Image (cartoon, rainbow, N blue to C red):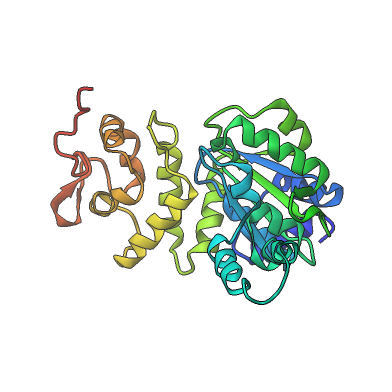
Amino acid sequence: MTDAATIRERFRERAFIVDEAFATALQIGLALEKPLLIEGPAGVGKTESAKVLADVLDTRLIRLQCYEGLDSMAALYEWNYPKQMLHARLSESDGSSLTEREAQIFSERFLLKRPLLEAITQERPPVLLIDEVDRADEAFEAFLLEVLAEWQVTIPELGTIRARHKPHVILTSNRTRELSDALRRRCLFLWLPYPSLEQEISILHARVPGLSERLAEQIARVMQVLRGLPLQKAPGVAESLDWALALMSLHRDHLDARAFEQTLGCVLKVYEDQGVLKTHQAAIEPILEGASTAAAPGGHSLDTDFGFGSVSTPRP
């Protein structure tokens, strides 16, 4: 896998559609052995891209899910204390010295490897996914910088452990906070936006076999409209795929007002966003089947409120 065209083809074979910019960023990251920081809105495939990359490279995926309060020990290792205590009790009468018993207790057999340590002790380079790094705090980010720079960690009881092979590193961020300049300098950067209309249609066909051409285009067009509205949570590609599967489970080959109403929960996940859509429903109507004054199957007219009723925004 030496060029962007090959990367695109390998990803497409796994039903993951990437453009030339994405494939080129992956190509450069693999060639330079540098981490790739992927930013973009939620639900556009940042995490999934690392999973597919591991499959393409036929290597292991190791994921570090970041969260507020994550510390270095949780990301590196911890000792299996219950097993250590059991071993200590069982070895009290075996005649070994205290020094020997301590050496046994703090050996690798009692070490629980966490994602970062696991990644640098593999026999072949894994894909290390550091997911939602923006959720971790600045202290952990500083620690992460040191690991990315040296690819070695020190365990007081065991000494320094150096990477056998550099992992292929993908970091993702939803930009809930701004990352440091130091981390950005350490990485290559890729902004992953929502897909274009044509890209989303291709994604739907690749990931949802049997989806009709008409339905795929309608879903993609509705998504383009929704992402342009002032929603609290705009739907991503994941919602597009869920929606397509839901409509197929209802044996729909096209999208009309009734199907839209029945499956709206696949797309909008915040109550207040339904109210926003109600005020902009005229932008959706032309995409649905029939004219704006025609009746949809089941007596649902396209100039209704899509089953929202009297949606209103609660007072704070």
Residue 41 locus on image (x, y percent): 53, 38
Towards the viewer: 60 or 237: 60
Residue 303 locus on image (x, y percent): 21, 39
Name the residue at 56% across, 32% down. Answer: 175
Towards the viewer: 24 or 31: 31
Q: Is residue 22 visible?
A: yes
40 vs 210, left or right, is right
How many tags in the picture?
A: 0
**Within the image, what quadrant is residue 162 found in?**
bottom right
Residue 231 locus on image (x, y percent): 38, 32
Q: Residue furthest top?
A: 316
Looking at the rendered image, the quarter that the C terminus falls into is top left
Q: Residue furthest bottom?
A: 94
Where is 288 relative to 54, above or below? Answer: above
Q: Is residue 130 visible?
A: no
Name the residue at 54% across, 37% down. Answer: 135
205 vs 159, left or right, is left
Looking at the rendered image, the quarter that the N terminus falls into is bottom right
Where is 209 relative to 157, above or below? Answer: below
Towards the viewer: 54 or 141: 141
Name the residue at 22% across, 27% down. Answer: 313
Residue 206 locus on image (x, y percent): 55, 62
